[in-house]
């Protein structure tokens, strides 16, 4: 079965540094997402992306965050200046058409630790 | 702003018995609900869904029940198997949520052999 792949699986960084989390969505999917889960908390929506544009974003997704689809396969999340509270598991997801009743396919996540 | 709540962080069940995982929501505009299962070091995987026009959806050992008036849904696993041990997330979306899903905090199910 096709799957969403994420790299790296773990990322450790110093506070204030920039990080880029990478994702390869399922090839025929059109909508891409980033979610995150802080340890012990709910999975939270960050951003959705369609047709090379942000479709929606949450309050968490402030100016420190950006997303990009630099080529036909990769989808990246950049955090410009990391903060301690950015430490979380970041999940990339994709869906075929972005419909309301359509399930998401998730990657296995990148555990980001900000020291 | 906890629109989807899973009040039981953990649940232990004997193998062969029924597992019942519960989820409550506050947004009456939610009309699509999903359950995801997550193993350690893996991403959530889709398990089963239900739309608000139904009150029950069944897929093998998994059944989801929706009570719209109570804003409550539950996932029943019968019979429970050790391989079902995982964290289960409830998620919801609706016409006013765009294309984002709201997730609960998850319930960790342990099925004891």
Image (cartoon, rainbow, N blue to C red):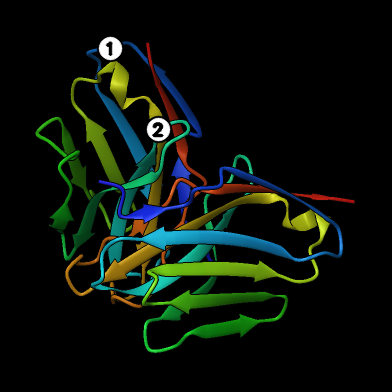
The first of marks 1 and 2 along the sequence is: 1
Q: Chain of mark 1?
A: A
| Residue A47 position in % (x across, y down) | 22, 50
Is B92 placed above or below A60 here?
below
| Residue B8 locus on image (x, y percent) | 56, 47
Whether residue A3 is visible to the viewer of this picture, yes or no, is no
Residues indicated by labels 1 and 2 sit on the same polypeptide chain? yes
- Say the numbered circle drawn on residue B48: none
SS under mark 1: loop
Q: Is residue B102 left or right of residue A2?
A: left
Going by the image, does B96 lie left or right of B37? left
The Cα–Cα distance between marks 1 and 2, rounded to whole angstroms, is 17 Å
**Label 1 packing within 10 angstroms: few (<14), some (14-19), many (20+):** some
Q: Dot 1 corresponds to which residue?
A: A15
**Position in image of residue A102 (x %, y %):** 37, 75
Query: For the point 47% across and 33% down, which residue is it?
Result: A40
Point out the residue furthest to the left here. A63
């Amino acid at each position: 079965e096709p799957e969403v792949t994420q790299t790296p699986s773990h990322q450790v960084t110093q506070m204030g540094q920039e990080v880029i989390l990478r994702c390869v969505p399922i090839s025929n999917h059109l909508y891409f997402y980033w979610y995150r889960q802080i340890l012990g908390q709910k999975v939270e929506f960050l951003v959705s992306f369609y047709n090379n544009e942000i479709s929606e974003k949450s309050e968490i997704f402030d100016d420190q965050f950006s997303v990009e689809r630099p080529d036909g396969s990769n989808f990246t999340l950049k955090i410009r200046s990391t903060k301690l509270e950015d430490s979380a598991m970041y999940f990339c997801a994709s869906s075929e058409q972005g419909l309301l009743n359509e399930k998401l396919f998730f990657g296995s996540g990148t555990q980001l630790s900000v020291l | 702003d906890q629109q989807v709540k899973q009040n039981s962080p953990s649940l232990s069940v004997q193998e062969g018995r029924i597992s019942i995982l519960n989820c409550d929501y506050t947004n009456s505009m939610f009309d699509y609900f999903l359950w995801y299962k997550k193993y350690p070091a893996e991403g959530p995987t889709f398990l089963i869904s239900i739309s608000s026009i139904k009150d029950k959806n069944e897929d093998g050992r998994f059944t989801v029940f929706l009570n719209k008036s109570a804003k409550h849904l539950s996932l029943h696993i019968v019979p429970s198997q050790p391989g079902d041990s995982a964290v289960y997330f409830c998620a919801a979306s609706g016409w006013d949520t765009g294309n984002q899903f709201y997730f609960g905090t998850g319930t960790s199910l342990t099925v004891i052999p």
